[in-house]
Image (cartoon, helix red, strand yellow):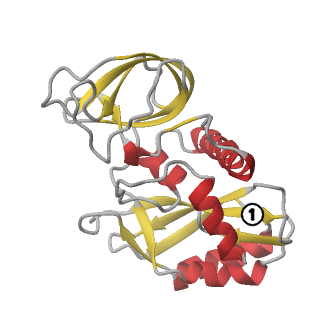
Amino acid sequence: MKYYFLTIIFLFGYSYAKACSCDLSWQETNNHYITSDFVGIVTINQVFNSPDRESNTFKIKVNTEKVFKGNQVSTLYVYGNRGHGIISSCDVGSVHQGKEWIIYATKNSKGKLAFGWCSNSKPMVKEWFDGKAKQNRQQGIDRELRILQYLSLSLPNFKRNYSVLPIGTNLSNYLEQYDGIELPSNSFYQYLITFDSNLNVQNVKRLKGLNEQFDSDFIDYLKSNVKWKVSFGDIPKTKIQYVFGLFYYDDQENGKRFLSPFEL
């Protein structure tokens, strides 16, 4: 039943229904915060067409409402071709004037801050969501904003160009022993992992822990039982750090409470 509940949230309560294939789906808030140059909430003031049929971006003017990483912006670029009848499954088609968005943007080859379908950027409100889907999505947005606020205060300049992911699913199996645990609703917990140049865990530091006994056992497990990889390319040849999150879910309809490494 737990996995059925997770599937329902994923399908109906999360960000986009992604026909476009994105490499990153693991702990999106943490990883996208780390790999982005700008993270914040903006209101879209004006949307421009792409300059020509060959362009792969279009420009938007925005008001910056909140900055979690980087500096205030007034101009952003969106991946896609707008106004020339060219449509790709990876284009962001729902960027409209007057809408408020959470934006994760990175500098493109021209030094412009840009975001696309796979960036984890999303509108704050989706008017077509209703009922349970709307409630689940709102809970996800609320937690995402709290995570971003926490990362902004704890690791304001944390930046690298790739993401780190665990290999396999043994983390979920380990966490099953805590099924039924009662914790604050929609809570999350964060741990800073330091890897050596071969992606072996050197150290794990509790940033926002659950309790002393849980954190001690969980950190030992991360050190000795979990293997990791980078999202693309070769293993980096230097030490790196990664913020690993745990997320608490309370399925009140089915009486299920559990911790998960998946952010839904």
State the residue at coordinates (41%, 63%).
Answer: 164
Looking at the image, residue 227 sits to the left or right of residue 21; the answer is right
Quarter of the figure with residue 182: bottom right
Q: Is residue 108 above or below residue 192?
A: above
State the residue at coordinates (58%, 78%).
Answer: 171
In the image, residue 95 lies at what x, y percent?
44, 29
Q: Which residue is mark 1?
A: 249
Quarter of the figure with residue 263: bottom right
Q: Is residue 95 above or below residue 46?
A: below
Asked whether 230 or 136 is in front, the reply is 136
In the image, residue 41 lies at what x, y percent?
55, 29
Does residue 263 appear in this view?
no
Quarter of the figure with residue 151: top right
Looking at the image, residue 167 sits to the left or right of residue 248; the answer is left
Asked whether 39 or 100 is in front, the reply is 100
State the residue at coordinates (68%, 62%).
Answer: 247
Q: Is residue 168 above or below residue 54?
A: below
Looking at the image, residue 179 sits to the left or right of residue 191; the answer is right
Q: Residues within 10 Å of mark 1 (few under 14, many from 20)?
A: many
- Quarter placement of the C terminus: bottom right
